[in-house]
Image (tube, helix red, strand yellow):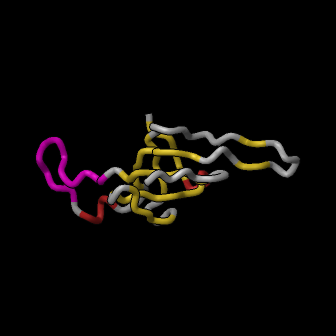
Amino acid sequence: MSINPIRDQVLVKPIAAETKTTAGLYIPDSSTEGPTRGTVISTGKGRTAKNGNLIPLMVSEGDTVMYAKESGQKVKVNNEDHLIIVEDQILAIID
């Protein structure tokens, strides 16, 4: 199944939070609260301004992004969890 978001919607595949440090220490659940990371799978064309001009999105396919934990609508794509979120809910692009 293929999902193609419209307007300023973005399809994101969440990245699982780390539960162990590189030194082998376990990270408690309370430390993983807060923003979540994911990979942009596909995007809409952009938002339409009041004058009718198309404002392109700042994110593109393949970007790793940070978003608020409870953002978006959960969807299944090929039996894998994804989110459809509005670009405004994206907090940052991670380099």
Q: Does 22 sit left or right of 3 as displayed?
A: left
Q: Does 29 sit left or right of 14 as displayed?
A: left
- The span picked out in magenta is 16-27
Q: Does 30 sit left or right of 70 as displayed?
A: left
Quadrant the N terminus occupies: bottom left
> Percent position (x, y) of residue 7?
67, 52
Q: Residue at x 76, y 42 (%)?
A: 54
> Percent position (x, y) of residue 2?
47, 51
- Taking depth in this image into account, of 76 and 27 the one nearest to the observer is 76
Q: What predominant SS class does the magenta segment belong to?
A: loop
Vertical arrangement, residue 46 with respect to residue 83, above or below: above
Residue 4 belongs to magenta span: no
> Percent position (x, y) of residue 36?
40, 54
Q: Residue at x 44, y 63 (%)?
A: 75
Q: How many marks?
A: 0
Quadrant the C terminus occupies: top left
Query: For the view shown, which residue lies furthest in the top direction?
Result: 95
Q: Residue at x 77, y 49 (%)?
A: 48
- Taking depth in this image into account, of 86 and 37 the one nearest to the observer is 86
Q: Does 60 sit left or right of 55 as displayed?
A: left
- Taking depth in this image into account, of 42 and 85 the one nearest to the observer is 42
> Percent position (x, y) of residue 5?
57, 52
Query: For the view shown, which residue lies furthest in the left direction?
Result: 24
Vertical arrangement, residue 58 with respect to residue 68, above or below: above
Residue 82: which quarter of the image? Answer: bottom left
Query: For the view shown, which residue lies furthest in the right direction?
Result: 51
Q: Residue at x 22, y 62 (%)?
A: 28
